[in-house]
């Protein structure tokens, strides 16, 4: 069962860019922690929100008391005016991945064929429930791939397997102009 941490962070006016830059640096270190399952920074009208998932509560509590966490808090402290934390276990294990691509108009059709070939190679990947190639109706050079996974662990097992290399023909098209050309989401509700 995943353990989720929700942070509500108030940032000093005028310090938003510095806070975001420092948070990205801090987040890289947290992402390297073996018990971290992913994190997101969301900017609201009056506050920032951080969602971080961990393998379990014990792993998070150990990290929370670590020198690395103390250092992270010290690095972010100059930008913060306050905040709060909520924690909770969640049994929503299914995850979605969205990868954003920027594709020249003349390469959309060839890329679609490449995607189809890659998808055929991925049939039977443990934990993969499916994937889709999406083409924007607003910007004809924007495409996205979404994939659906039984759990974050299944996704990570695949990412660290040799099978992940099958997706390499798509990598040159990743939309690196975006702050994050890909994002992993945990399903928190579905209808």
Image (cartoon, rainbow, N blue to C red):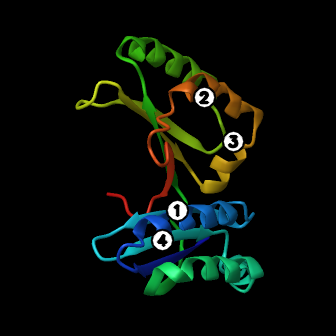
Circles 4, 2 touching at the beta carbon (< 8 Å): no
Left or right position of 141 against 70: left
Relative to 113, residue 170 above or below: below
Q: Residue at x 53, y 41 (%)?
A: 129
- Percent position (x, y) of residue 63? 72, 78
- Disc number for residue 123: 2
- Disc number for residue 158: 3
Q: Which residue position is annotated with label 4?
A: 50
Cα–Cα span, label 4 and label 1: 14 Å
Residue density around tag 1, few if under 14, some if 14–19, many if 20 or more, within 10 Å: few
- Disc number for residue 21: 1
* Closer to viewer: mark 4 or mark 2: 4
- Percent position (x, y) of residue 128? 58, 41
Q: Secondary structure at mark 1?
A: helix
* Closer to viewer: mark 4 or mark 3: 4
Sequence-wise, the earlier of marks 4 and 1 is 1
Residue density around tag 4, few if under 14, some if 14–19, many if 20 or more, within 10 Å: some
Relative to 31, residue 158 above or below: above
Cα–Cα span, label 4 and label 2: 34 Å
Q: Secondary structure at mark 4?
A: strand
Q: Quadrant of the C terminus?
A: bottom left
Q: Residue at x 56, y 17 (%)?
A: 117
């Amino acid at each position: 069962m995943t353990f989720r941490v929700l942070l509500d962070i108030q940032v000093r006016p005028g310090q938003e860019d510095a806070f975001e830059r420092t948070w990205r640096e801090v987040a890289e270190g947290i992402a390297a922690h073996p018990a971290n399952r992913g994190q997101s920074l969301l900017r609201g009208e009056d506050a920032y929100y951080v969602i971080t998932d961990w393998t379990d509560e014990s792993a998070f509590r150990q990290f929370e008391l670590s020198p690395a966490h103390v250092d992270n808090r010290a690095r972010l402290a100059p930008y913060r005016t306050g905040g709060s934390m909520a924690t909770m276990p969640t049994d929503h294990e299914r995850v979605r991945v969205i990868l954003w691509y920027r594709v020249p108009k003349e390469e959309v059709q060839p890329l679609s064929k490449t995607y189809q070939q890659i998808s055929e190679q991925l049939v039977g990947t443990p934990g993969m429930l499916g994937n889709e190639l999406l083409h924007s109706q607003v910007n004809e050079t924007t495409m996205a791939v979404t994939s659906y996974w039984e759990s974050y662990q299944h996704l990570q097992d695949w990412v660290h397997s040799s099978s992940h290399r099958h997706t390499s023909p798509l990598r040159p098209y990743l939309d690196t102009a975006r702050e994050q050309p890909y994002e992993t989401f945990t399903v928190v509700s579905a209808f």
